[in-house]
Image (cartoon, helix red, strand yellow):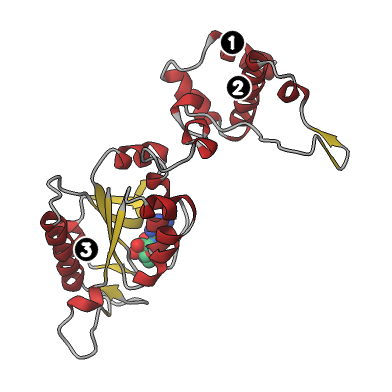
Amino acid sequence: MRFDVVSLFPDMFSVVRDAGVTGRAHKQNLWSLNAWNPRDYTHDVHRTVDDRPYGGGPGMVMLAEPLECAVEAAQACRSNAGLTQTAPVILMSPTGQRFDQAMAQELAAGPGAILICGRYEGIDQRFIDRCVTREVSLGDFVLSGGEIAALAIMDSVVRLLPGALNHADSALEDSFNDSLTGLLDSPHYTRPEHYLGQPVPAPLLSGHHVNIASWRRQQSLMLTASRRPDLIVKARNAGLLSKADEAFLKQLLA
Ligand code: SAH
């Protein structure tokens, strides 16, 4: 797994490379990261990477050429490194497809990606038309640059790589994953058994694995039904809800 990021702020990526689960996975060589600065692919003394928009309006627009040269450099470097599978060129953009766990799983099964981080008002459309294979949004809000979106994507993909997580922090039981049939995770508790007068829910202390699993499943169903009813519908349409799930939901709504 190899990620290449095209960004005017390559230093921002040390976070995901050095810290926590993704940092550990990087040390274990489960993935690698290379940053490409469009400024290194300019030819003028000012190393210009942006200019005023045609048609007027506020803000600046990123020039197509330094971006395209940076992508070409990343692609050449990947193939020199022996990566035969072409990587998708993904533009971070609020107008893109909303990123989700399914996309993270899809990327985790591939060779990585070249992630393009925009800045300013946007990017010359001709670069997007020529080089970008997919546009992805982190959500319905506007960031001042694509770097934080790229960091989020890499983090969510790397933690899915086999060996990235210890048993202790297994991804299987996370929200949106298959073992939860795409629903939200249930609440977690640890010691002490009583915290400021609040006890741990009794089923979790019972030592009875079937009861614990069924309590967790019901908590998941309850939380998802109230916060993300769309995920219940999705799981139902995919045939992932059991008879017991449906009976519990029916009782919940009654
Ligand atoms: N004028 C653009 C926003 C530009 S923000 C618009 O309204 O659509 C500058 C850069 O930040 C973008 O080029 C993109 O790379 C990044 N960005 C902003 N919001 C984002 C989001 N929700 N998801 C992913 N990238 C985002």
Please report whichever mark, 2 or 1, sits nearer to the chain's N-terminal start: 2
Badge 3, how many Cα within 10 Å: few under 14, some, many 20+?
Answer: few
Q: Where 225 falls versus 87 (above or below)?
A: above
Type of amino acid under label 3: Gln
Please report whichever mark, 2 or 3, sits nearer to the chain's N-terminal start: 3
Q: Which quadrant is the C terminus positioned in? A: top right
The disc at residue 125 is 3
Q: Position of residue 180 (x, y in %)?
A: 51, 26
Q: Where 62 falls versus 160 (above or below)?
A: below
The disc at residue 9 is none
For label 1, the residue is: 244
**Is residue 39 visible to the viewer in this orientation of the structure?**
yes
The disc at residue 217 is 2
The answer to whether mark 2 and mark 1 are in CB contact below 8 A is: yes
Q: Camera-side residue: 143 or 160? A: 160
**Residue mark closest to the camera, 2 vs 1:** 2
Name of the residue lying farthest toward the bottom: 45
Say whether residue 11 is left or right of residue 109.
right
Badge 1, how many Cα within 10 Å: few under 14, some, many 20+?
Answer: few
| Image-quadrant location for residue 122 | bottom left
Badge 2, how many Cα within 10 Å: few under 14, some, many 20+?
Answer: many
Picture residue at 21% right of the left edge, 77% below the top: 40
Type of amino acid under label 1: Ala
Q: Where 48 falls versus 100 (above or below)?
A: below
Picture residue at 47% right of the left edge, 23% below the top: 235
Type of amino acid under label 2: Arg
Please report whichever mark, 1 or 3, sits nearer to the chain's N-terminal start: 3
Say whether residue 206 is left or right of residue 182.
right
- Element carrying mark 3: helix
Q: Where 130 falls versus 11 (above or below)?
A: above
